[in-house]
Amino acid sequence: MEENLKQLTTIKATNKEIVSFMKDLGIQRAKHHGWPNTYVFTKAMGEMLLGELRKDVPLVILRPSIVSSTYKEPFPGWIENVRTIDTVFASYIKGTATCLRGDPDCIMDIVPVDMVVNAMIVAMAAHVNHPNSGIIYHGTSSASNPIKLHQIIDWSVEYLTKHPYINKDGSINARDFKLLTTETSFQKYIAIHYQLPLKVC
């Protein structure tokens, strides 16, 4: 990494070029070590570091699946920032996303953030007096409460039909949302709704 950075500095690469190159390098390194991307690679590195450096400090790791807004606490639906699956919900609510490509029967392993926090507290309390613990828990929902992609979309459309999102100017966005099940249907939808209007302009 340092060698590449030095070479980029020597050839007077711009900050944008350096950032782009280093991102690509990170992805290459992650894939070289068997990880699909830098996100899971750095999470694995963090777990390894904790395992190495903890000594006699009790360690419990909780690996949640897709973390989403709250179930109950501090109130239903609360979320501090928009990440992962929530970007799709936020885009749909604001009317900027009109379709999604996916398998309607795909199990969406979503866990509300307050349940993840509660699981962390319980896991810590259960292992507080076990200095040799190096326990890993997986906080997931698909085995006991499987939710399919089409259910999430159906529930979202139903909810937002009853409780529409009102823009600052008082307007309400259209709530039509298509779940496209094939690459062909997705490409066709994009061509008709986005590429064709751009060519007409």
Image (cartoon, rainbow, N blue to C red):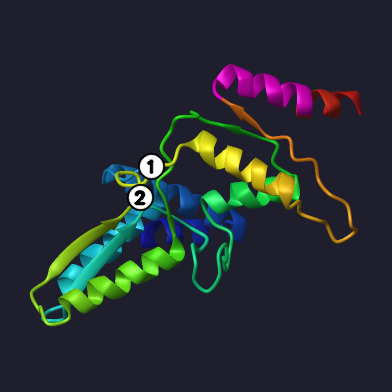
Q: Nearer the viewer, residue 90 or 105?
A: 105
Q: Is residue 136 above or below residue 117?
A: above
Q: Residue at x 55, y 64 (%)?
A: 76
Q: Secondary structure at mark 2?
A: loop
> Label 2, on which residue?
141
Amino acid on which the number 2 mark rests in the picture = Ser
Which part of the image, by quadrant, shows the N terminus?
bottom left
- Number of marks in the rendered image: 2
Could you tell me what secondary structure mostly forms the magenta stretch?
helix
> Label 1, on which residue?
146
Q: Nearer the viewer, residue 57 or 181?
A: 181
Q: How far from the left and from the top, in percent, is residue 89?
A: 62, 49
Mark 1, Cα crowd under 10 Å, few <14 / some 14-19 / many 20+, is some
Amino acid on which the number 1 mark rests in the picture = Pro
Q: Is residue 115 above or below residue 138?
A: below
Residue 111 covered by magenta stretch = no
Provide the residue span drawn in magenta: 181-193
Q: How far from the left and from the top, in percent, is residue 72?
A: 49, 67
As measured in the structure, the alpha-carbon distance from the residue carrying label 2 to the one carrying label 1 is: 6 Å
Q: How far from the left and from the top, in percent, is residue 20?
A: 54, 51
Of all residues shown, which one is farthest toward the left? 132
Which part of the image, by quadrant, shows the C terminus?
top right
Q: Is residue 10 left or right of residue 133?
A: right
Asked if marks 2 and 1 touch (Cβ < 8 Å), the reply is yes
Q: How far from the left and from the top, in percent, is residue 66?
A: 43, 52
Q: Is residue 160 visible?
A: yes
